[in-house]
Amino acid sequence: MTAQRVLITAGASGIGYVMGEAFAARGASVWVTDVDTDALSNLPDGWKSSHVDASDEATVATLFENIGTQWGGLDTLCANAGSAGPTAMIEDVELTEWRKCVSVNLEGAFLAAKYTAPLMKAQKSGSIILTSSTAGIFGYPHRAPYVSAKWGVIGLMKTLAVELGPFGIRANAICPGAVEGQRMEGVLEREAAAKGMTRDQVYAGYAAGTSMRSFVTARDIASMAVFLSSPEARMVSGQIIAVDGHTENPDPKI
């Protein structure tokens, strides 16, 4: 049986890296992209990798040409590249900051899907998994560019599910909540500064805003990605799946 072929954008660290580990543990062939050259040089043996800016069409196009040549197709796309963007009141957000955040989060997902579709159509099968966020379900204060982009990812996913379903291709979006890790630490520090709170107060607010009273881990997200790409999820498409411990309060505060 041919190994599952999985592409993960922003896969050299964080959630993407843990996704790679989870797929590899099940025998999949893993290809990751990233802009972090150092992280790309420290990947597990057997993983393929490419230095790619998810929002740059020329490098994305080259990536998929290489995938087509070397793999002959693609079974699973995890479009995971993202940027937290600025933390500020709307009147203080610079247009350049807005565009950078939307470019990585939304345009990056669009480009990955655009170049994945022909490969999957040719084989009449595939699973496209977009990383959105609970910010794509709720409004969040001080995060306008990020929230807008993640809502856009949901719309993109819904469209992909309708367009590509007749070709045997499924599309779903995972919406992580607050995920333990370096990126979230940066968000906590910036929100604390913006709201005049301490980092620990903001952390407690996020945790208290979920039914499970806890952050989630990258492993929780990876497990959902593995499921969505599996035969067990063969009729799951067009779905917004939150892995967040059930967010109740999208405005973290004490």
Image (tube, helix red, strand yellow):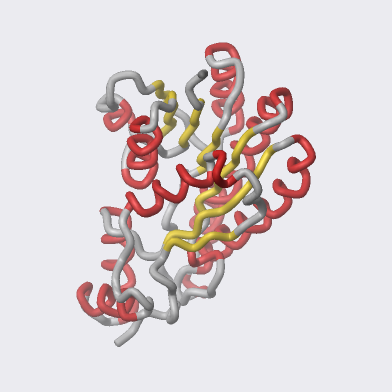
Q: Residue at x 58, y 12 (%)?
A: 69
* Spot occupied by residue 57 in the image (x, y as percentages of width and height): 61, 32
Closer to the camera, 164 or 144?
164
Do we see residue 122 in this rendering? yes
Residue 169 rendering spot, x and y as whole percentages: 68, 38
Residue located at (52% from left, 68% from top): 144
| Residue 86 appears in the picture as rendered | no
Q: Quadrant of residue 44?
A: top left
Q: Is residue 114 left or right of residue 16?
A: right
Q: Which residue is outermost to the bottom?
A: 254
Residue 45 relative to residue 76: left or right: left
**x%, y% of residue 208?**
31, 80
Quadrant assignment, res 164:
top right
- For image coordinates 60% across by 54% down, the residue present is 153
Q: Could you tell me which residue is drawn at 43 percent across and 27 percent down?
A: 28
Vertical arrangement, residue 68 with respect to residue 98, above or below = above
Q: Nearer the viewer, residue 167 or 60?
A: 167
Seen in the picture, residue 153 relative to 44 is either above or below; the reply is below
Q: Position of residue 53 (x, y in %)?
A: 48, 34
